[in-house]
Image (tube, rainbow, N blue to C red):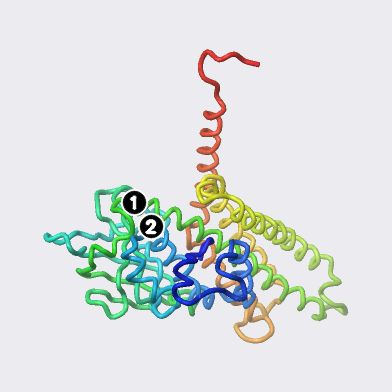
Amino acid sequence: MPAPLPVEWLKRLGIHDILGTTVEEWDYLHTGIYLDEISRTGLAGPGGSMTAGHTFGIPPVIKFGSKALHEKFLPELLPGKKRTCIAITEPGAGSDVANIATTAVKTPDGKHYIINGEKKWITNGFWSDYATMAVRTGGPGASGLSFIVCPLKGYPGVTMRRLKVAGQISAGTTYIELDDVKVPVENLIGKEGMGMRYIMTNFNHERLTIAVSVTRTSRVALSSAFAYVMKREAFGKTLIEQPVVRHRLAKAGAELEALQAWVEQFLYQMTQLTKEEADIRLGGLTALAKAKAGMVLNECAQTAVLLFGGNGYTRTGQGEIAERIYREVPGARIPGGSEDVMLDLAVRQLVKNYKNATQAMERPKGSSKL
């Protein structure tokens, strides 16, 4: 969950510390450490299953939801009595969030929304009781989007089925069909038409957490390969004695160490900047870091598989972790915004910041120059 934590609510529920750190002291560095440790398994699925709700689904409710919405959902969601997820992606709208087609139309008495549409590739959806869902309450484009808490498990009109994806098997990737789902208007998060803003704010956090987790997974892949080549013999000597092997490790390692330093810098900056400052200064860079993390994971995982040889292409045995991580690489490069979209977004945000800074530096007309 993004820092700072909802301290008052956590204390109200009897949660005063997390892993020995008081809820008041918990900041983004702690979040980074937590994600890093979970990712030491090298498996993306368990982490996604355990953290998706708290990391992506609950924050919009806390940040933008009404007090009544807090009272209704947080007592069960925060301690994990009920589970939630984030439901944005659709068959026809992935990175193009503004193209979301799922509709939420108010009933004539104005007391409910009737939701119709589909959501696809929803992490943790299969086991979730609720979804923080992007819906269209207005016209076309970004201004017509809203966020709403939609009941899922066993709710009338909701049909869910697990998708057979290549990786992250235990993350419960889900296809959700919504057929005249009746939801109270009180479940609206914030205001109608503000969904795009809420989504983008949430994406910054999501992309940073992905980058942190992927950095550790990259290290697991490369470390496993390093340990293997230290003992594996070929042509009368260990693989590590082969110059080409050392070169391959060095190339991937250089990328990994640079990414590690960059991600840690991000976490530090998040503890020093206000939320508004972070959104402006780091929004585009967070997208870039997420894209770069996927590239580095691909490099490290591919290096590991090639150095393990046949063992790295086998789902059991000493190379199984390399095989599994390599199979899950697309799961890091696609969710949270596909790689190409992230690269474009990063530069567009940089251009925007440059123009704003240039305008701010311009002197009023008629002023003298030094």
Q: Amino acid at mark 2?
A: Phe
Q: Residue furthest bottom?
A: 317
Q: Which residue is mark 2?
A: 64
Q: How many marks?
A: 2
196 relative position to 252: left or right: left
Residues under numbered marks 1 and 2 in contact, where contact means CB atoms less than 8 Å apart: yes
Q: Position of residue 229 (x, y in %)?
A: 78, 76
Q: Which mark is residue 213?
A: none
Q: Position of residue 269 (x, y in %)?
A: 62, 52
Q: Which residue is mark 1?
A: 194
Nearest to the observer: residue 197 or residue 211: 197
Which of the 4 quarters of the picture holds residue 327?
bottom right
Q: Secondary structure at mark 2?
A: helix
Residue 212 can be seen, yes or no: yes
User: What residue is drawn where x is 86% and y is 72%?
Assistant: 241
135 relative position to 109: left or right: right
Q: Nearer the viewer, mark 1 or mark 2?
A: 2
Above/below status of 256 relative to 76? above
Nearest to the observer: residue 114 or residue 219: 114
Q: Secondary structure at mark 1?
A: loop
Q: Amino acid at mark 1?
A: Met
Q: Position of residue 95 (x, y in %)?
A: 42, 56
Q: Position of residue 199 (x, y in %)?
A: 41, 56
